[in-house]
Amino acid sequence: MRIAHFSDLHVLDLAGVDARRLWTNKRATGMINLKLNRGHKHKPHAVEAIVADVKAQGVDHVVITGDLSNLALETEFARVRTMIEALGMGADRVSVVPGNHDVYTRGSLRTQRFFNAFREFMTDDRGVAKREHHGSGVFPFARLRDGVVLVGMSSAVPRAPVLSAGHVGAAQMRALRQVLTERATRDLLPVVLMHHPVINPRGAWRSFSRGLAEAAAMREVLAAREGDVLFLHGHLHDRGYRTLQTKSGATVHHVGATSASLLHEHPDRAAGYNVYDVSDGAVGPVHARVYDPEKRSFFDATVTAKSSEFAD
C-alpha cells in the first residue's frame, strides 16, 4: 500500500466573513500574524500543486494531519474540501485529523466545526470512536485498509494567544491502546495520525507552548505494540524521521510532514509531502516529494533522520 502524507495547509479564505469575527478572541492575534509573517510564506498554490502531483503518483491512500485551515472558518473548510475533492479519490481513500488551527476558538470547538465539515474522512470501522473521548469530535477513529489500520487521533484544542500545545486525554489513549493490542489488528500495520508529535520540541518554553501535554504517556501507549507502528504528524513544519523502540523490540516510525503551503529555503521545511510504502505489517521505503516554487514542480528527496531525544 502506498500512502501520501501532507499536513499544515493553513488555507486562508476570508471571503464574506464578518470583520467582527476576525478581530475578536484569538483570531485577532492570528490576523496580526498573517499580516506580519505567515501570510507572506504560506501559499495556496503550493497545496494545489501537491494535489496534482499526488494524483500523478497513483497512491492508494492520502492522509492529512491537521491545520487544514488558518482560523477555523467555514469558508476555509469549504476551500479545503474543494482541494480534497480535486484528488479524485473517494472518502474511503482519504483520512484527515484536526490541528490546533482547525479548533482555533472555543466556538469552533463547541460546534465541532471541523469534524462536521470533514466527517466522511473520519469514519470509524472498529467502533472505538466516542464523542466523549475528545471535545473536537468523535475520536479516535480506526479505518481498515489493505493490510493497515489507520487510527485518527485528535490533539486539537483551543489555546490562549501564542500557545498551540496539544491535548489528547486519557480516554483517547485507552481507545488507542485497545486498537494497538487487540487480536483483530495483530497482523495489520497501525498507521497512527495525529497533529502533534509525541516527541516535544527542545527547550522548556517551546515544549510547553507548542508540545503535547501527554507526550510521554502517548509514547508508552505506542511502545505497548508488539509489532511496528507508523506514527505520522505535522505541526512543527519540519520534515523529519525519528524512531522509537517498542517493549518487544519493534519500531515506532515517527515521521513528520512539513507545511504543504510553506515556501522556505531549508529543504526540511520546504512545501511538499511524504510517501510511504507499507506491506506485510512493515514500513518500507519513505521519501519526500519537495516543491520547487521557481519551477513549480517536484523532486524526490530523502526524509532526514533526526534525533529521538525527548524534551519532556
Image (cartoon, rainbow, N blue to C red):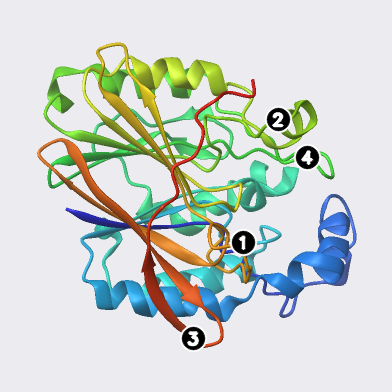
**Residue type (three-letter) at the residue carrying disc 4:** Leu
Where is residue 70? Give x, y as percent: 68, 61
Determine which of the numbered discs, if any, sits on residue 207 in the image. 2
User: Dividing the picture into quarters, in which one does residue 72 lie?
Assistant: bottom right
**SS for tag 4?**
loop
**SS for tag 1?**
loop
Q: Residue at x 58, y 69 (%)?
A: 261
Q: Residue at x 38, y 48 (%)?
A: 122
Residue, far bottom: 295
Query: Which badge, 2 or 1, comes first in the chain's sequence?
Result: 1
Query: Which badge, 4 or 3, comes first in the chain's sequence?
Result: 4
The residue beneath circle 3 is: 296
**Nearer to us: label 1 or label 3:** 3
Query: Which badge, 1 or 3, comes first in the chain's sequence?
Result: 1
- How busy is the neighbourhood of tag 3: few (under 14 within 10 Å), some, or many (20 plus)? few
**Residue type (three-letter) at the residue carrying disc 1:** Ser
Q: Residue at x 71, y 59 (%)?
A: 71
| Badge 1 vs badge 3, beta-carbon distance below 8 Å | no
The residue beneath circle 1 is: 69
| Badge 3 vs badge 2, beta-carbon distance below 8 Å | no
| Badge 4 vs badge 1, beta-carbon distance below 8 Å | no
| Cα distance in 3D space between marks 3 and 2 | 35 Å
**SS for tag 2?**
helix
Q: Is residue 19 left or right of residue 128?
A: right
**Nearer to us: label 4 or label 1:** 4
Q: Is residue 106 left or right of residue 74?
A: right
Q: Residue at x 58, y 76 (%)?
A: 44
Determine which of the numbered discs, if any, sits on residue 255 in the image. none
Residue 149 visible from this viewpoint:
yes
| Cα distance in 3D space between marks 4 and 1 | 17 Å
| Badge 4 vs badge 3, beta-carbon distance below 8 Å | no
Q: Is residue 149 left or right of residue 305?
A: left
